[in-house]
Amino acid sequence: MGMNQAYAPGELPVSFPIFPLAKALLLPRGQLPLNIYEPRYLAMVDDVLKSHRMVGMIQPDPDASARGLFPVGCIGRITQLAETGDGRYLLTLTGIARFRVIEEIDAVTPYRQCRADFTPFAVDFSPSAGEDLVDRDGLLRTLRSFAETNDLQLDWDSIHEAPNEALVNALSMMSPFGPKEKQALLEAKDLKGRADVLVAITEIELSRGKNPQTTLQ
């Protein structure tokens, strides 16, 4: 199956490994590079490569217990993989669909696993859904203000050429915001909602007049 493989809800595993990682946002058809070096996650990659090649990205909930997670994550498929000389995996996850955790499995594996429900996010299985409703001009105005305020150099040619879905999701994934803001972007109802949330969060940061800890790449 290639990088652009389309899936239906019934084709995804009901249970799968999860990779809790703060501020790491994966969205449908977005690409997330990961540097895997912990033994438990190296084992996770080895295991999924033998089957469906899928991993669920999910954020720890900063307001919950030590092992608490946000209820919604996004499953992705390993579409690129390279091994390094020092025992790491450099891989790319391509997002497929968001999921809601039903329960965490009491697994014997060193990594965590969950059972999940994809049905609340049926829109994720339709590429480009909602693109026409996105306020692209408003999004680009806000992005330009943010870039100027934070002295960011962006590839504006690529930004202007990108379709709305790719633009909104890429900007959301690269955004330098905290876990709660990233989760709000993830859980937005649809593409228009995500674009609106992204603009709102960015405008709040601009009004505060401070630089986030990290910057857009």
Image: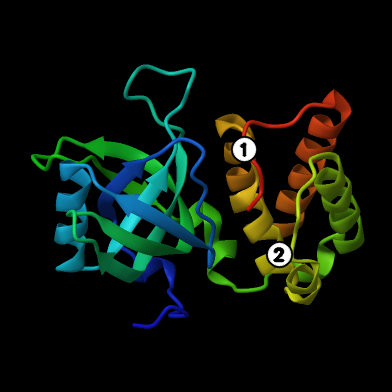
Which residue is depicted at the point 91% across and 61% down? 137
Mark 2 vs mark 1, CA separation in Å = 20 Å
The foreground one among 209 and 22 is: 209
Q: Residue at x 83, y 64 (%)?
A: 133
Q: Could you say where residue 38 lies in the image, as x and y percent from the top left?
A: 22, 42
What is the crowding at mark 2: few (fewer than 14 residues within 10 Å), some, or many (at least 20)? many
In the drawing, does residue 193 fall left or right of residue 49?
Answer: right
Position of 103 with respect to 150 (left or right) is left
Question: Few, some or many C-alpha atoms within 10 Å of disc 1 (few <14, some 14-19, many ≥20)?
Answer: few
* Image point (82%, 44%), residue name: 146
- Which element is circle 1 on? loop
Q: Which of the 4 quarters of the picture holds residue 13?
A: bottom left
Q: Is residue 9 left or right of residue 23?
A: left
* Residue identified by numbered label 2: 167
For the N terminus, give its image quadrant. Answer: bottom left
Q: Is residue 190 visible?
A: no
